[in-house]
Image (cartoon, helix red, strand yellow):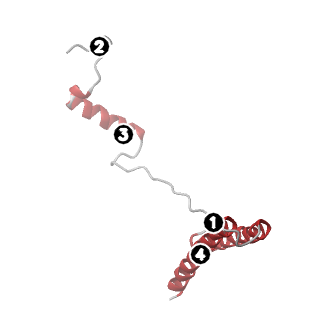
């Protein structure tokens, strides 16, 4: 139940952030249509940007509370059965011994067709 409430809180905050961004954008229309003076529009935009920073900080707090301070992704290399580099080299040499046509040619001249 607590997990549902947590995700609901994040969802509500994201929707609120989107509504605030729309409101800030609507202030541009107010300015274009001369519904408000330029000073009033700038004052309201300034308040909106400040609220946006607060909302983003709150979302960061929620994320860190749930997932910890680091959300960095670390890709683990796939394990192909080899435990270290030497085993990998032995495996590669065996494979190339079975399929010599996979080896690069040592001809440095231009390709002739």
Q: Does label 3 or label 4 sit earlier along the sequence?
A: 4
Residue at position x 69%, y 66% from top? Answer: 31
Name the residue tied to disc 4: 19
**Neighbour tally class for label 3: few under 14, some 14-19, many 20 plus, Cα within 10 Å:** few
Left or right: where 74 falls relative to 48: left
Give how far across and how far down residue 63 sits, in percent. Answer: 59, 71
Q: Is residue 99 above or below residue 27?
A: above
Q: Earlier in the sequence, mark 2 or mark 3?
A: 3
Q: Earlier in the sequence, mark 2 or mark 1?
A: 1
Quarter in which the C terminus is drawn = top left
Rendering quarter of residue 50: bottom right
Q: Which mark is residue 87?
A: 3
User: What residue sits 57% from the left and 70% below the top?
Assistant: 67
Mark 4 or mark 1, which has the lower sequence index?
4
Q: Which residue is mark 2?
A: 107
Q: Dot 2, how many residues are within 10 Å of its Cα: few (below 14), some (14-19), or many (20+)?
A: few
Q: Earlier in the sequence, mark 1 or mark 3?
A: 1
């Amino acid at each position: 139940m607590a997990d549902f409430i947590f995700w609901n809180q994040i969802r509500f905050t994201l929707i609120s952030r989107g509504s605030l961004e729309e409101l800030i954008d609507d202030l541009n229309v107010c300015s274009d249509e001369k519904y408000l003076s330029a000073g009033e529009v700038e004052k309201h935009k300034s308040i909106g940007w400040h609220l946006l920073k607060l909302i983003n900080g709150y979302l960061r707090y929620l994320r860190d509370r749930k997932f910890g301070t680091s959300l960095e992704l670390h890709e683990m290399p796939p394990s192909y059965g080899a435990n270290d580099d030497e085993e990998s080299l032995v495996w590669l040499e065996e494979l190339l011994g079975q399929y010599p046509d996979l080896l690069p040619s040592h001809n440095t001249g231009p390709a002739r067709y």
